[in-house]
Image (cartoon, rainbow, N blue to C red):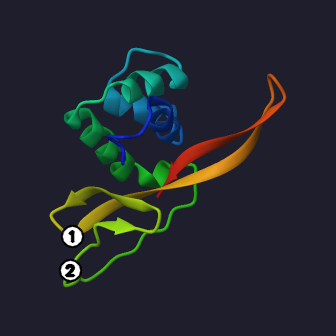
Amino acid sequence: MLQQASVEDRKRLLELFPVANLRQVFESKKTRKEEICYAEASKSGNAQIKRVAEFVDNHLGCCKQHVYVFSHDGSAKLPDDVADGEKVLDVDGKHGLYLSRAEYTVVLRDRWKKTRWNFYGR
């Protein structure tokens, strides 16, 4: 899912997190949050996609959206996907990060235009 996501979608996902966490993990010399998110979202190799997924997983508690965390005793196999989403990170079959796409209608204030945006949610 993250591999096929647009740069804008990955940027929006990263923008859900505090700039301090972004600077620390991505070691960016850029000062503005938007610049850091765009720079990291623009990179597309498998290693970068994994890095973004691990960042989201490790900093989920700092995310600005509501999150649902489920646990199991280790005897259940984690599913490969969830409704309207998929698993983007699996840690030894004991822990998984799943993303689902959500679409919102927003009003852009600089042009007073109504449009739809896609976001990833956890």
The residue to which callout 1 is attached is 94
Left or right: 48 in relation to 85: left
SS at mark 2?
loop
SS at mark 1?
loop
Left or right: 61 in relation to 73: right
Quarter of the rendering containing residue 25: top left
Mark 1 or mark 2: name the one nearer the start of the chain.
2
Q: Sort mark 1 into few (<14), some (14-19) or many (20+) by Cα contacts within 10 Å.
A: some
Number of the label disc, if any, that sits on residue 15: none
Looking at this view, name the residue that lies furthest to the left.
92
Q: CA distance from mark 1 to mark 2?
A: 6 Å
Say which of 40 and 3 sits in front: 3
Q: Sort mark 2 into few (<14), some (14-19) or many (20+) by Cα contacts within 10 Å.
A: few
Q: Residue at position x 44%, y 30% from top?
A: 7
Measured as percent of width and height from the top left, residue 22 is found at 42, 32
Quarter of the rendering containing residue 81: bottom left
Measured as percent of width and height from the top left, residue 102 is found at 57, 54
Left or right: 121 in relation to 78: right
Measured as percent of width and height from the top left, residue 8 is found at 50, 31
Q: Residue at position x 35%, y 52% from top?
A: 57
Number of the label disc, if any, that sits on residue 74: 2
Amino acid type, mark 1: Lys
Left or right: 76 in relation to 23: left
Q: Residue at position x 18%, y 68% from top?
A: 93
Amino acid type, mark 2: Gly
Say which of 47 and 1 sits in front: 1
Q: Residue at position x 40%, y 68% from top?
A: 82
Say which of 47 and 36 sits in front: 47
